[in-house]
Image: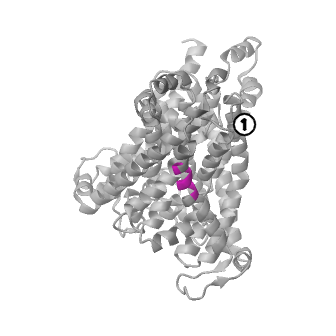
């Protein structure tokens, strides 16, 4: 796959431009606005800094971490975050896999149907939150309430009675398209001959799925899990615009808790300590993804890297 | 009808059904945007109603809505232009002059995309406050540039890498400068890559709501913040809310339809081959 012949490698050094000028600006912007702020987050996590009382500042050691770790709200938010991410992963992968197998088939109007299916991914998260909160889940005027009445059930105030499940449904709706598109991409490299051969050998549809398709998709599925986890760990707008973390703390996730500590309670130090945890959580997954991306980079560069 | 034909039929029907279910909430919102406020909350829900352009007209003629729309445009297009300006030279240098460090530089750039925004919001907020940059649409665009830069660099790099070195060399032999080489040779053949990177960046910036909610308040807030303000609206203004949302999501949805494949490639950084 590489276009880099050994000839082109032997360019005279004299015409080799100074790549620092080409790469530098992009790197500088990223360093100034991601790396330095994260270092500052760590700095703030060891200090007392209250926006309402800015005079009382100073180094507090691990004080912020202690007050965070001994606060049950923090553990509730970690629990909520893991439940949200875990449940959405299960739903999106199961449904996404099913839909990918469906859309892998050739049928008239497939492109249009696929376009409709993936549309939720392009809807602004705040808009999704409002559609679900009002037009679908509203206890009186919502479509679900009306459907419940038709079937002789009592209407349910979904966001009040089942807050986390409702958020999971909403976020899953947004992320099923992502899982579907990735799994479809993975399916495209599946050899049709192998499937045909299995059919001729009398394999059932289930055996085909179990012994050919699933092993083939193993890497794709692991990428879906990792990337979705990284993106889902940062879910904020959906919660902000629908439940505001409530009722009580039922839908307060880690990002939402950090937001509350920083912009509602003005406790910068504690919020920063929470942010350090958020980054650690994301990095646990990111390390694996980056390793995989790095391996693929090496493979396609023909050892040039 | 043969057995195989019938299964095919059932699968097709199932696919249409799934498509209908997934798209339904969006369709319902579009419909609600054309209803009167009374029809919008009618029980049983009205599929047939006399459409009115009242809510849409109101959304379009409200001066503040136009301002939010403009802010969305500025932050999405401005950040995309700036990201391209930074990414094109970077991707060019990584694709055509790779060094020992190229892979790790690219991986490091991608890693910044995996940093959760909450990890940096506090210092960024404090810096913006001290610089008087809060509620400034260009400052918001700067954050969007940072957010999308890794995706744009990766998309361009992946494409540039496939361009034969000889093409660039021909220009170099003719004594072209780097700037000429990029603008006259590289960009004309990479229109598709630049377009898909731009589309991706516009979509992500347009829909973003964490930075916009925390860094803007009134003057500079884009549509995401305006739509979110409906969450506390007293009374039920579903038709107005739907009309405002509809206009907010429509342009980006069309872009998303156009950029389905590139979107996957851009967001997976080559993790799926």
- Indicate left or right for B214 with A279 as reference: left
Based on the displayed image, in which of its 4 quarters is residue A56 positioned?
bottom right
- x%, y% of residue A89? 66, 47
Q: Is residue A126 visible?
A: no
- Indicate left or right for A31 with A197 as reference: left
Of A186 and B14, nearer the camera is: A186
- x%, y% of residue A124? 45, 51
Residue drawn where x is 36% and y is 63% of the image: B220
- x%, y% of residue A230? 64, 51
Quadrant in the picture for the N terminus of chain B: top right
Based on the displayed image, in which of its 4 quarters is residue A269 positioned?
bottom right
Task: Identify residue for label 1.
Answer: A295
Image height check: is B18 above or below B3? Answer: below
Q: How many marks?
A: 1
Badge 1, how many Cα within 10 Å: few under 14, some, many 20+?
some
- Secondary structure of the residue carrying tag 1 is helix
Colouring scheme, one of rainbow, by chain, secondary structure, one colour: one colour
Quadrant in the picture for the C terminus of chain B: top right
Q: Which residues are magenta?
A: A25-31
Residue drawn where x is 67% and y is 56% of the image: A282
Q: Is residue A288 magenta?
A: no
Main structural element of the magenta stretch: helix, strand or loop? helix
- x%, y% of residue B56? 26, 52
Of B99 and A86, nearer the camera is: B99
Of A235 and A299, nearer the camera is: A299
Which residue ends up furthest to the front in the rendered image? Answer: A14
Of A191 and A98, nearer the camera is: A191
- Indicate left or right for A227 with B150 as reference: right
Q: Is residue B263 visible?
A: yes
Q: Label 1 is found on which chain of the structure? A: A
Based on the displayed image, in which of its 4 quarters is residue B255 positioned?
top left
Residue drawn where x is 38% and y is 51% of the image: B78
């Amino acid at each position: 796959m590489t276009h880099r012949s050994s000839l082109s490698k032997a360019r005279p050094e004299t015409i080799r431009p100074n790549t620092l000028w080409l790469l530098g600006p992009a790197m500088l912007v990223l360093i100034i606005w991601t790396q330095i702020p994260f270092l500052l987050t760590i700095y703030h996590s060891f200090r007392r800094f209250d926006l309402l009382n800015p005079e009382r500042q100073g180094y507090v050691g691990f004080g912020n971490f202690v007050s965070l770790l001994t606060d049950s709200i923090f553990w509730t938010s970690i629990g909520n975050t893991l439940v949200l991410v875990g449940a959405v992963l299960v739903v999106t992968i199961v449904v996404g896999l099913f839909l990918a197998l469906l859309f892998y088939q050739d049928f008239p109007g497939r492109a249009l149907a696929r376009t409709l299916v993936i549309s939720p991914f392009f809807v602004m998260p705040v808009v999704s939150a409002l559609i679900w909160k009002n037009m679908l889940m509203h206890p009186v005027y919502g479509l679900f309430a009306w459907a419940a009445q038709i079937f002789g059930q009592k209407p349910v105030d979904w966001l009040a009675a089942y807050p986390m499940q409702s958020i999971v449904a909403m976020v899953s709706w947004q992320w099923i398209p992502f899982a579907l598109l990735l799994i479809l991409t993975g399916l495209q490299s599946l050899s049709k001959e192998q499937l045909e051969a299995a059919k001729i050998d009398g394999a059932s549809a289930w055996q085909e799925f179990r012994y050919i398709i699933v092993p083939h998709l193993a890497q794709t599925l692991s990428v879906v899990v990792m990337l979705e986890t990284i993106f889902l760990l940062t879910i904020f707008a959906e919660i902000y615009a629908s439940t505001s973390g409530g009722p009580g703390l039922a839908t307060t996730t880690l990002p939402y808790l950090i937001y509350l500590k920083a912009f509602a309670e003005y406790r910068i130090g504690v919020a920063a300590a929470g942010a350090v945890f958020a980054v650690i959580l994301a990095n646990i997954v990111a390390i694996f993804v980056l390793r995989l991306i790095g391996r693929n980079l090496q493979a396609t560069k023909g050892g040039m890297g | 009808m043969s057995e195989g034909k019938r299964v095919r039929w059932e699968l097709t029907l199932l696919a249409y059904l799934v498509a209908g279910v997934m798209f339904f909430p969006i369709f319902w919102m579009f419909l609600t945007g054309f209803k009167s406020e009374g029809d919008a909350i009618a029980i049983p829900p009205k599929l047939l109603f006399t459409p009115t352009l009242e809510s849409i007209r109101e959304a379009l003629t409200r001066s503040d809505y136009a301002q939010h729309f403009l802010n969305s445009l500025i932050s999405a297009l401005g950040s995309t232009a700036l990201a391209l300006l930074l990414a094109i030279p970077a991707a060019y240098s990584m694709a055509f002059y790779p060094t020992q460090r190229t892979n790790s530089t690219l991986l490091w750039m991608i890693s910044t995309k995996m940093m959760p925004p909450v990890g940096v919001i506090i210092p960024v907020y404090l810096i913006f406050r001290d610089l008087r940059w809060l509620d400034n649409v260009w400052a918001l665009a700067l954050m969007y540039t940072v957010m999308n830069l890794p995706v744009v660099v990766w998309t361009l790099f992946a494409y540039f890498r496939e361009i034969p070195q000889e093409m660039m060399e021909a220009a170099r032999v003719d004594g072209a400068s780097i700037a000429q080489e990029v603008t006259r040779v590289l960009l004309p053949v990479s229109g598709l890559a630049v377009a898909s990177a731009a589309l991706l960046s516009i979509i992500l910036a347009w829909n973003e709501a964490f930075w916009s909610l925390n860094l803007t308040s009134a003057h500079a807030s884009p549509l995401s913040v305006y739509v979110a303000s409906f969450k506390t609206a007293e009374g039920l203004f579903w038709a107005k809310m739907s009309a405002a949302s509809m206009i907010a999501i429509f342009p980006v949805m069309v872009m998303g339809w156009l950029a389905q494949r590139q979107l996957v490639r851009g967001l997976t950084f080559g993790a799926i081959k």
